[in-house]
Amino acid sequence: MKKIFSIAVLAALALPALAQDTYTNDRISNTSDINGTARYVGMGGAMGALGADISTMSTNPAGTALMSKGVFSIGMGALIQKEKSLPGDDKSHYSFDQVGFVAPLNINGDNLKRIAFGLNFQKKLDFNHSMFANQSGLGGLSQAAQLAGLAQDYWDQLNPNSFLRDSYYYGLYDVYAADGSQLGFQTTDNSYFRTTSGNLYALDINFSMNHQDRYYFGLTVGVDFLSYASYSSYVEQRAGVYSDGTLMEETHPDYNQNYTLNADQHISGAGVNFKLGGIIYPFEENPFRLGLAIESPTFYTLTKEKSYTTVYSMWKGHEDKTTNTYYYTPESATYNSLDDNYLEYNLYSPWKFRIGIGSTVGRSFAWDIEYEYSLNKRTKMGYPRTIYRDYWGTTSSITMDKDRSLNTMTSNIMKGVHNIRAGIEFKPTSHLALRAGYNFYSKPFKTDARFSQDEFSEAMNYQLGTDYTNLGVTNIISCGIGWQGKHWFADMAYKYRIQKGDFYAFDDFYQTSSDAIHEAQFVRSSTGTLQPVEVNLSRHALTFTVGYRF
């Protein structure tokens, strides 16, 4: 039992509140959002066929080849969370959104008309968000029971570390009364709070060319910079149960088995990707155009560090060295894991394929409709491995050891994401532009997806909790306005991103599957399986861009 409890608490460090699991990997790499210049955002990012905007180099690199003049722009933004998670939360956040330029060089040859070079640094994802989920009527379903089951099954696979020395003192389960009798537990309520911060930025280096004013081609090399931080707090409220079914609170009203599990996590690193694109005018003397683009996975090298857990338990463990056993007394105790939860790992984001059509009507109206398919279920994770082959230790190659178990789980619970976006721009005068856009992203997770913690993965040694969220569809509505002078221009856009998700504080496999019941003190749920808590992830955003054409 000592081994089981020790590993259960290690599992609390080795599970997915925010670490190297499928759900966190999706959270930090799934760019189901629209960011960039205010013109680009206002049109819903649907400019892959129209081109002629700095931000198009991030989706269709050929778009910059349609720019006949040089452009420099810089933008800022504000993000406002729709629902306040806790009283006193600040729902607003300001960010640096974009800075970049495109410098075209007119060749005016018979075939090659123009080449262009561009640099753009812009935000891809904003991680600043907070959420709260409260659940009652659990009927005995418990995070601690899940951890205990995992402990019994995976003791031999999990790496022991110094945290194991203190694991019994956490008192998450296997709790004993002062008289030495073992208690079960009847979980009644839980609550979960998480706040995240950080950004994913990209530096795009773009080359494009104009061939015969009908065929446009481009290449973008993207370098991503990721910084992600998270703090979460899980509280489980439960009553002790004696073997005869008597609730401990009936004999000791002041005693309970409540505990709080907090987790801090930081992930940072960089990655590189490549994009190829083309825009074609299929009909001579007709503004209708076709856009095609492909984006490689982003090859991330990431580091998880400065991550740890803190547990506040109502029970304190004591060691009886004469009998070599542990027992618990109702004394409040606080424990901190060592700040050594360090892991280097590789993450390969999905391939993406895009096709779009667009056109203009004179100089007053433009439209664009696009489709994107993202192979999210092919997201891969692994660990860096350096191979040496000569006597002096010269590096011959650097490869990745794949996490086959986690990658299999990713393939099983995720699916390809379909994105449809559309945008229009209307210019009532030569100086004024009005814009509108719409985006739809399909669900990234299957309906019955769960975080299958009973499938061992090396990453499980570095996790910090047990929660996961099955995201719903995403709808993005945007609009914007722009002013154009002789050289200077200014744009503003508003974006409303609508998304909900089904939140689970833990997976209930060890209490709802008859094959996974190991311990008699696990109280079977009286309400069936764990039901999700619907969380609202919607938010508003404003983007402002000013620029100069030369």
Image (tube, helix red, strand yellow):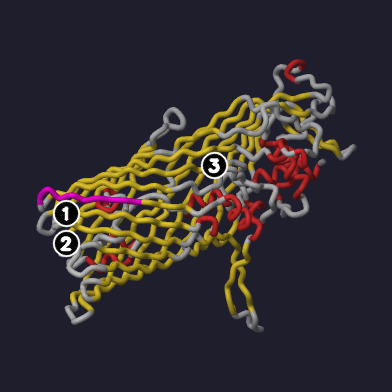
Does residue 235 lie above or below 204 as drawn? above
Instruction: Kindly state the secondary structure of the residue where label 1 is placed.
Output: strand
- Farthest bottom residue in view: 391
Amino acid identity at mark 2:
Arg
Which one is closest to the eye, mark 2 or mark 3? Answer: 3
Instruction: Kindly state the secondary structure of the residue where label 3 is placed.
Output: strand
Give the numbered dot on residue 331: none
For the stretch drawn in magenta, the main secondary structure is strand
Query: Residue 337, image x and y in percent?
Result: 64, 45
Disc 1: which residue? 489
Instruction: Kindly state the secondary structure of the residue where label 2 is placed.
Output: strand
How many C-alpha atoms fall within 10 Å of the one at disc 1: few (<14), some, or many (≥20)?
some
Disc 2: which residue? 549
Query: Residue 336, image x and y in percent?
Result: 63, 42
- Farthest front residue in view: 283
Q: Quadrant of residue 247?
A: top right
Give the numbered dot on residue 469: 3
Q: Earlier along the polypeptide chain: callout 1 or callout 3? A: 3
- As measured in the structure, the alpha-carbon distance from the residue carrying label 1 to the one carrying label 3 is 42 Å
Q: Quadrant of residue 207?
A: bottom left
How many C-alpha atoms fall within 10 Å of the one at disc 3: few (<14), some, or many (≥20)?
many
Residue depicted at x 36% and y 54%: 123
Q: Earlier along the polypeptide chain: callout 2 or callout 1? A: 1
Residue depicted at x 47% and y 52%: 417
How many C-alpha atoms fall within 10 Å of the one at disc 2: few (<14), some, or many (≥20)?
some
Query: Residue 423, image x and y in percent?
Result: 28, 50
- Give the magenta part as a residue range: 421-429
- As measured in the structure, the alpha-carbon distance from the residue carrying label 2 to the one carrying label 3 is 45 Å
The answer, for residue 166, to whether it is visible in the render is no
Left or right: where 156 falls relative to 23: right
Q: Nearer the viewer, residue 297 or 390?
A: 297
